[in-house]
Image: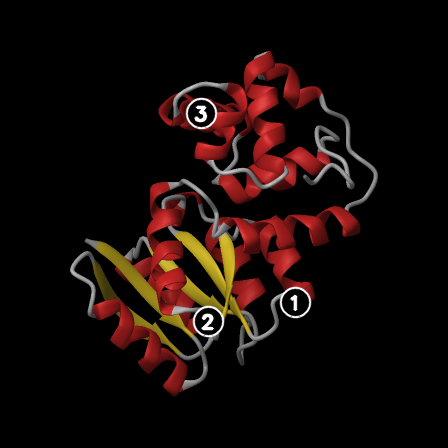
Amino acid sequence: MIRVLLADDQLLVRAGFRALLDAQGDIEVVGEAADGAEAVGLVRELRPHVVLMDIRMPRLDGLAATRALTGDPGLCEVKVVMLTTFELDEYVFEAIRAGASGFLVKDTEPDELLRAVRAVVDGDALLSPGVTRRLIAEFAARSKEPAAAEDLARLTEREREVMALVGIGLSNEEIARRLVVSPLTAKTHVSRAMVKLGARDRAQLVVLAYESGLVRPGWLG
């Protein structure tokens, strides 16, 4: 059973998400928070698998709450998905850098919300390819000069190749087709790269691909 915590200052938004999620046989909403401070406290108490976190909330906003959660080693299994009204919200990119596993616009289709919750728990594709690629394109446009890439020396040549493909938004299935390997093999390479680089999830692997210079703006295809 996937345990989800909802953090949003709008009661109607929380009610809508709860009704959809609780109707699924494999998902359970274990708690609700009306602000970031309450969300952090409930996460530490309830240990959900996924937090759907609004970016703009009183007392403690979603970005600060995400940093508090991802900075706690005891909560490394908790995945945060940001909720935003605007698809290209400036705070989304800071949230991804802070360790959020992805983002959803609040008027997303129900099926996409459900896929996203299941995907981040599985550690597979961040979100739907279209949304992921728009996020990556915007991140690339905002990215600074690449940092030193010493950490990439820990990766094999194939792992670097796979990480670059993750960085341009390809799913495991697309990577498998590109490299003529099985999806399971592609997923294994992604997982190994994440472990070696200390990435919490696929979203941080994308960030590291740009920050290390392994992928550069303009490489999207």
Distance of label 2 from label 1 (alpha carbons): 21 Å
Which residue lies at the image location 51% right of the left edge and 23% below the top edge? Answer: 196
Left/right of residue 219 with respect to residue 164 in the rendered view: right
**x%, y% of residue 199?**
52, 35
Residue 29's disc is: none
Q: Report helix, strand or loop for mark 3.
A: helix
Q: Which residue is identified by label 3?
A: 186
**Residue type indicated by callout 3:** Ala
Quadrant of the image occupied by residue 27: bottom left
Q: Which residue is identified by label 1?
A: 89
Which residue lies at the image location 72% right of the left edge and 24% below the top edge? Answer: 149
Nearer to me, 136 or 10 = 136
Nearer to me, 37 or 102 = 102
Q: How packed is label 1: few (under 14 Cα within 10 Å), some, or many (20 or more)?
A: some
**x%, y% of residue 67?**
55, 56
**Residue type indicated by callout 2:** Ala
Q: Is residue 47 above or below residue 23?
A: above
**x%, y% of residue 82?**
50, 63
Q: Quadrant of the C terminus?
A: top right
Q: Which residue is identified by label 2?
A: 37
Distance of label 2 from label 3 (alpha carbons): 38 Å
Nearer to me, 90 or 72 = 90
Which residue lies at the image location 45% right of the left edge and 82% below the top edge? Answer: 9
**Residue type indicated by callout 1:** Asp
Q: Report helix, strand or loop for mark 2.
A: helix
Q: Is residue 24 above or below residue 38?
A: above
